[in-house]
Amino acid sequence: MNTGIVLLDTVYDWFFLGVLIVLAVFLLLCLIRAIIGPKIADRLVAVNMVGTMVMVMVAVLALKMNEGYLVDICLIYAMISFLAVIILTKIYLGVYKEKKMREEESQ
Amino acid sequence: MEWIRFAVGAVFLLIGISIFAIELIGVYKLNYVLDRMHAAAMGDTLGISASLIGLMIMNGVNFLTLKIFLVVLFLWISSPVSAHLLSLLEVTTNEDKESHYDSDENESAGRHEE
């Protein structure tokens, strides 16, 4: 972050570094939740949470490194994660219904 | 003047991160998927909006601030749709739903009488 004062620049740097480390620890815990969770919907909820935390991390990095175009990446990542949840849900619903129809035909 | 801007932005950013911590504790302690979705929606709406409002305050009046606001707006519009589809998946593919509902056979803590 580029203000005029040198002391404020170092305070900004260390503050953003602390925020990034805390968010990285939370991301690892969300990943453990995605591995443990017994059903499909548990894992999809955890992946959604990972996406949200990554968005905050990218926005903080955009301010820390003073590069403006990283916020565009954040916006595109939001759209892609939303699309991924919708497509995975439709696929799992289709697989379940196909299994049900095959079981009914074989009876 | 710059110090006041840093202080206010830092307070908002720390509030946002504490909301993420509360969401993570909630997802670990609850037992059923539809309960965990209550906790996860808290991070999607309030957690990210408080964090990004803190970043907007730190940045001043700029074009980058408007782009960060667009990220918040898109996430507020698209997050309820994905939550609705996830709950539809869970209700459709669950064979044994009746044990989670509050019917007369499994009443909890004697709230309803007869």
Image (cartoon, coloured by chain):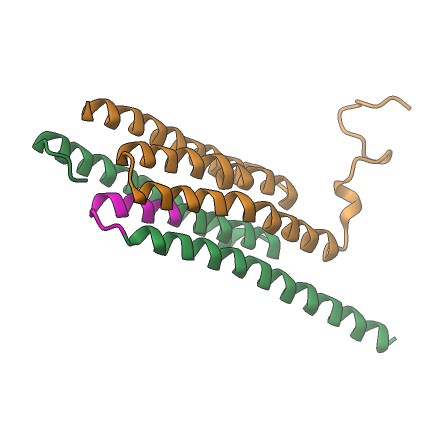
Chain colours: A green, B orange
Q: In x, y percent, where is residue A45?
A: 55, 50
Say above or below: B57 vs A67: above
Give the prevailing secondary structure in the magenta stretch: helix
Observer-nearest residue: B29 or B60? Answer: B60
- Give the residues drawn in magenta, as a range: A55-68
Res B53 quadrant in image: top left
Tell whether A4 sits left or right of B84. Answer: left
Q: In x, y percent, where is residue A79?
A: 48, 56
Observer-nearest residue: A35 or A88? Answer: A88
Q: Is residue A58 magenta?
A: yes
What residue is drawn where x is 29% and y is 43%?
A20
Q: Could you tell me if residue A93 is visible in this image?
A: yes
Q: In x, y percent, where is residue B36?
A: 59, 41
Q: Is residue A24 magenta?
A: no
Say above or below: A100 vs B23: below
Quadrant containing the N terminus of chain A is top left
Observer-nearest residue: B74 or A50? Answer: B74
Tell whether A29 sits left or right of B113. Answer: left
What residue is drawn where x is 10% and y is 30%?
A7
Q: Could you tell me if residue A39 is visible in this image?
A: no
Tell whether A82 sits left or right of A71. Answer: right
Res A85 quadrant in image: bottom right
Quadrant containing the C terminus of chain A is bottom right
